[in-house]
Image: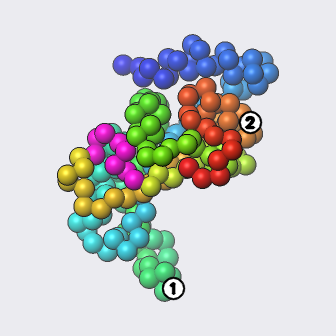
């Protein structure tokens, strides 16, 4: 089954973006290639139960198994050892990416307390958009009673756009609540 947002992109958003961005070819129009979700564990990385709980939470949010990331080198000041757990991450592509984006925009982001929109400053020079969420409890897949600790997460939306303007227009067409005046989310 094809996700609702993918159909909307192909039939409605693509022609609008071609007109707005003055693209002569549909392959010039920016599109999302992948979404990366990341939870850093900090000092909880030494506890295997907490790593497993975070991995299970992220897997249920994404609908795909999360992997445990490891430190690449030891740094004494940060109390890290090479090969020890650093966090958990998952990369979503194609259908799962569109399904997650739909849940994020329509269900999760409106559940954030005192939410005033996402900052436009999260767009980097390569056209990718990154933002953080302070509580992973905003996702309906998480059972509040079983959560030991509330964790934040980083979300990166990777696009084919080479400009900030192209990425901003793409996000607006997908109904992301972008706030130009805010400096924080």
How busy is the neighbourhood of tag 2: few (under 14 within 10 Å), some, or many (20 plus)?
few
Residue shown at 36% from the left, 19% from the top = 1
Q: Is residue 138 magenta?
A: yes
Separation (CA) of disc 2 from disc 1: 40 Å
Instruction: Determine the image quadrant of residue 180.
Output: top right
Residue nearest the observer in this picture, 120 or 4? 120
Residue nearest the observer in this picture, 169 or 37? 169
Q: Position of residue 100 (x, y in %)?
A: 42, 35
Residue shown at 63% from the left, 40% from the top = 179
Q: Position of residue 184 (x, y in %)?
A: 60, 53
The residue that mark 2 highlights is 165
Q: Is residue 33 left or right of residue 56?
A: right
Q: Which residues are magenta?
A: 135-142
Mark 1: secondary structure: loop
Q: Position of residue 68 (x, y in %)?
A: 36, 60
Counting every numbered tag in the picture gives 2
Tag of residue 155: none
Residue 1 higher or lower than 169, as above or below: above
Instruction: Determine the image quadrant of residue 141.
Output: top left
The residue that mark 1 highlights is 77
């Amino acid at each position: 089954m094809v996700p609702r947002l993918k159909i909307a992109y192909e039939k409605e958003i693509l022609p609008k973006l071609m007109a707005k961005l003055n693209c002569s070819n549909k392959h010039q129009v920016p599109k999302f290639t992948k979404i990366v979700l990341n939870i850093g564990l900090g000092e909880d990385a030494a506890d295997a139960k907490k790593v497993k709980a975070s991995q299970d939470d992220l897997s249920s949010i994404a609908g795909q198994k999360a992997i445990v990331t490891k430190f690449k080198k030891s740094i004494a000041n940060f109390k890290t050892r090479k090969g020890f757990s650093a966090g958990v991450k998952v990369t979503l592509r194609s259908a799962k990416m569109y399904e997650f984006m739909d849940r994020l925009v329509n269900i999760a982001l409106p559940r954030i307390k005192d939410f005033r929109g996402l900052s436009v400053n999260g767009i980097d020079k390569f056209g990718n958009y990154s933002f953080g969420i302070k509580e992973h409890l905003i996702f309906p897949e998480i059972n509040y009673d079983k959560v030991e600790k509330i964790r934040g997460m980083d979300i990166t939306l990777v696009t084919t756009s080479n400009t900030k303007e192209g990425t901003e227009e793409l996000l607006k067409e997908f109904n992301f609540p972008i706030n130009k005046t805010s400096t924080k989310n």
